[in-house]
Every structure is written in structure tokens, then in C-alpha cells.
Image (cartoon, rainbow, N blue to C red):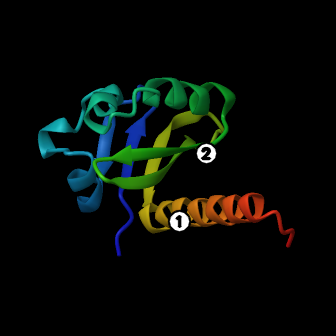
Amino acid sequence: MEIPSLFADRELLIQRFTLSASKLFNLLPTDIGSALNILAPRLEYLALPDDVARARDEFCPVHRDVQIGDRWYLTRIIPDRNLDGEFSGVIIISLDTTDQKESEVALRASEERAAFVRESSGVGF
């Protein structure tokens, strides 16, 4: 399984991406050299430019759950350094977490049902 990955340079221009990233982010080979902010509206991830700026400026990874269509992804923006320790770009990876999200929703619903039963029966567990 290939992880959707995208690589941008210090000017935040797209340099390369994996095949799975091209499918997920709706990228074409002609997008190489384009500004990274073209992804925000495609992904409905409007905070992308701010998250990239934070990763660049604070030199720390940024993690965010992003919904793309009916799927959920943990998107990580990782700053990259060159051999001199200077900022040289960012790497963006997205891991499909849909199954985990669906399990969390089911668990929350189950806990709410159990709380309702406890409250309405007057019996403590």
C-alpha cells in the first residue's frame, strides 16, 4: 500500500508526488511547479496554507484530520531541512483513518445509549 505523499520545495512549489497522492489530491503532472496552495480548495482543507506556514515558521510537524469526500485522512505536514539545517520544503502525507473514525462514532453512540439506559432505569452500574 502506497502512502499518498507530496513534496514541495522551500518556495512551497510542488516538486513531486506519489501516484496515490495524485489520485487523492487530484494532481496532474502539469501541477509540478505549481504553488502548494492549489490543494486547499481541492481537498476542502482551507487551513492548509496556514498549517504549511506554521510547519515552515515553527519548524514543527502539523497534524490535522481532513475529510475528503466520504473518507477521513490524518494529514501530516512535515518540514524538511537541508544538510545545513535550513528549511528546504515540506512533505505532506495523508493516512486513511476512515475505519478508525467510524469506530469512534460507533463507540460514542454506544456510550450514549448506555448512559440513556442507566439514567432512564434509575439503576446504577
Number of callouts: 2
Calculate the distance from the C-alpha at mark 2 to the C-alpha at mark 1.
47 Å
Query: With 60 as the anchor, is 50 left or right in this view?
Result: left
Kind of residue indicated by mark 2: Leu
Q: Return the mark for residue 83.
A: 2
Query: With 110 as the anchor, is 94 left or right in this view?
Result: left
Residue placed most toward the observer, 69 or 17: 69
Q: Residue at x 40, y 27 (%)?
A: 46
Q: Is residue 95 above or below residue 43?
A: below
Q: Are marks 2 and 1 in contact (CB under 8 Å)?
A: no
Quarter of the image with the N terminus in it = bottom left
| x then y, percent, for residue 70 | 30, 53
Mark 2 crowd level (few <14, some 14–19, many ≥20, 10 Å Cα) = few
| x then y, percent, for residue 83 | 61, 45
Which structural element holds mark 1? helix
State the residue position of label 1.
106
